Amino acid sequence: METTTVRQVEINYWPRQQFQPFHNRTQRWACLVAHRRAGKTVATINDKIKRAITDAKPDGRYAYIAPLYNQAKDIAWTYLKQYSYPILAAPPNESELRVDLINGSRIRLYGADNPDRLRGLYLDGVTLDEFGDMKPSIWTDVLRPALSDRKGWATFIGTPKGKNAFWDIWQEALKEEAWFSMMLKASETGLIDPVELAEARKQMGEDQYAQEYECSFEAALKGAFYVEELRRAEADGRIGRIPIDRSQPVHTAWDLGVTDSTAIWFVQCVGKERRLIDYYEASGVGFDHYAGVLKAKNYIYGSHYFPHDVQAHELTSGKSRVDTLKGLGISPEVVPLSAVMDGINATRRMLDQVWIDKERCERGLEALKQYRREYDDNLKDWKMKPLHDWTSHGADALRTFACGFADKTMLRPINVTPRGRGSWMGQ
């Protein structure tokens, strides 16, 4: 008769009381927003080790994922080796950043910069650290399917960097019963000395301090291009519910994506005011989809401003994008190529005359708030060029309008085709 040996093992981890609710959770999904130096990596690594050794699943597979592979190694590898040491079946695998436990489970570190390495795996549990710095598709396209057949769990952790994909996860966690959610602010946890916090606030400034230590998703990001212009707009009451004047034409301004998103601003110009009344963004669909969106909104359209790359020809059809759009009833106004910083400065000037509908333009407004310079880690300084991420689409679309519309308004009025007289928008 085969006997089972029970072995009692003590792991040298004493949870901070602030993380006890997280360790005691029963939900399958979790989102943990925590201030810097709160200990979220240590807590989630130990949570993973406990689940890997106690889950009654054969050959359990667990992953910790950071935005970059080197980050995973720098942030979590030492912790994983240290805390799993009493239950290792073999020495840690340094080349694969992997530990094998005595019950057959395996924990491995990955980087979101190489999502193909994760395809085809099955997972029983995964932690995504600083999810806001990853492409959101790594969750929807790669990791969520990997959890399905074994009904694995997932934990998202991070510190806010504006309203990005991590914000979206946090909002879902707050609303859904299947989610555990917890936010740890430095002013409430008591984990960092108040004198140190006061010194950090003085040196970092209010926005960065609010983001890093008070878990603010609203704080302006360091290096953001339009932070002062949008602050003035907020203070002047120019961001809120903006009525649509049905007697005025609505112009559109586009940023075209191939593998990325396509973004469209809907703008009315009344006197010197630029009213951003609507915004739309999507990916993975053709121009016919966007033509349908414009038609469904039922605006009286003026001009449609496109970046210079709208003139490119498609390899499959041989037709230019301009021809394709004209066939759908959209006549592009091609905005000449200009220096990026010149366009950003034109947008800055325009933003002082802009009114923005906070609800209809929510995603576009967030893109403008978070559109920022790229940081050079080697020079420890900000580059002049913008960081290319999800915010680029909305920001570039508005830049197209700022560059394309300004010089034309004094030259001639916009010709508008009335609804119901041959325009596809009025049919």
Image (tube, rainbow, N blue to C red):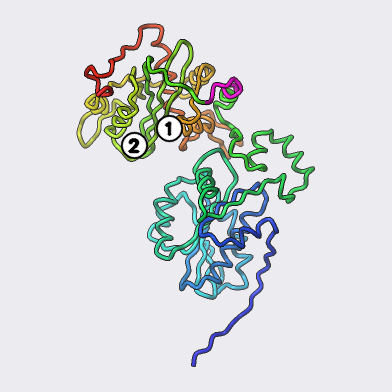
Q: Is residue 24 magenta?
A: no
Q: Earlier in the sequence, mark 1 or mark 2?
A: 2
The residue drawn where x is 59% and y is 21% is 232
Kind of residue sitting beneath label 2: Val
| Near-viewer residue (326 or 313) | 326
The residue drawn where x is 28% and y is 28% is 312
| Near-viewer residue (203 or 43) | 43
Pointer 2: what residue?
258
Pointer 1: what residue?
393
Residue 98 point in image, percent of width and height: 52, 64
Q: Is residue 239 magenta?
A: yes
| Near-viewer residue (229 or 95) | 229
Kind of residue sitting beneath label 1: His
Residue 155 point in image, percent of width and height: 53, 56
Relative to 87, residue 48 above or below: above
Relative side of 115 to 231, left or right = left
